[in-house]
Amino acid sequence: MEKNTLVTKEFNYGQNDLIEIVGNLDTNLSLINERLNTNLMISPEGLSITDAPNKVEQVGQVLQLIDNMRRFYKRLERKDIEYAISAVLANKADAVAKSVHEVIIHSESGRMIRPKTLGQRQYVDAIAANDVVFAIGPAGTGKTYLAMAMAVKAFKNREVNRIILTRPAVEAGESLGFLPGDLQNKVDPYLRPLYDALFDIMGYDNYQRYVEKGMIEVAPLAYMRGRTLDKSFIILDEAQNTTNEQMKMFLTRSGFGSKVVITGDVTQIDLPKGKESGLKTVSKILMGIKGLEFVILTGKDIVRHPMVQRIIEAYDKYENREK
């Protein structure tokens, strides 16, 4: 690179603002430099960079997004920094800047529930724009939780009258058939992740009240047969464990004014050997239908502990080698 192609730019920040932006032990600063392959550094004025014009422009856009986020979010997380960088690299900085202040809903504890990655942003937008959405991706990408947040939002806005959550009662390598209790006691372990998400978003007391009124229903997939579900927000979780017949049955339950979200991870199929996953087949059948969208989430959209992302990436590499 010739010297005359370099430009220098200063970004002025006060001491407190600078500490928030660069992060503890300059972790945010290091992440920006690593991902953009540049040399942003702390200077007497705040931050300084000397690099090619396009790099300087990218850094400026990233810092602007981070600055917007920190003014709105209670605390900047690593995922927020990665979100800002990914948005700039994907030429979506303007779109993300407009959505920084958008919150799907506040949880019962007051926590803001919002998309944290570009994939999650696409997912939320797809749910808002379509009657049926398939979200396919690994664990930790927010497939179920964001769908649940959108369902509660639609319910509170009176866009739907009911929330219906279901998943197939397929055992993940463990036998639950000898658990004590009645049928509901036996199926509850399969549905526990759905309960957990609902309790977190709307609180246990609210959940219990709406269940008693029949406005929220959590049930195994087999309970959906023969029903027509009008004015409902319906979520099918762990859809990779449906058979083709079950998937067809579920998709034909939707009635007028309903919205359907199907989530699953095709790398974690627990069906008996020889049974084909309805989630793997459905894209070949329904792709391109109006009002229906498939959203593919990846390891970049994982918002759990960073170790989860590393574990999934390691498994992907191993499985690809084995193939």
Image (spheres, rainbow, N blue to C red):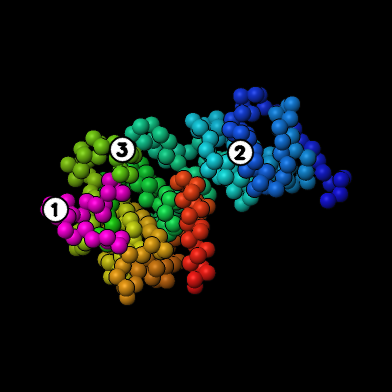
- Element on which disc 2 rests: helix
Q: Which residue is mark 3?
A: 202
Dot label at residue 317? none
Q: Give the alpha-carbon distance from disc 2 to disc 1, as whole Å.
A: 51 Å
Q: Give the alpha-carbon distance from disc 3 to disc 1, as whole Å.
A: 29 Å
Q: Which residue is mark 2?
A: 28
Q: Earlier in the sequence, mark 3 or mark 2?
A: 2
Q: Is residue 317 left or right of residue 176?
A: right
- Element on which disc 1 rests: loop
Q: Which residue is mark 1?
A: 180
- Element on which disc 3 rests: helix
Residue at screen point 35% across, 41% down: 153
Which stretch is magenta?
Answer: 171-195
Q: Nearer the viewer, residue 140 or 129?
A: 140
- Kindly identify the amino acid type of the residue bearing the numbered disc 1: Pro
Considering only vertical position in the picture, is 44 above or below 28?
A: above
Q: Give the alpha-carbon distance from disc 3 to disc 2, as whole Å.
A: 33 Å
Sort mark 3 into few (<14), some (14-19) or many (20+) by Cα contacts within 10 Å: some
Residue 295 included in the magenta stretch of the image: no
Q: Is residue 244 left or right of residue 177?
A: right
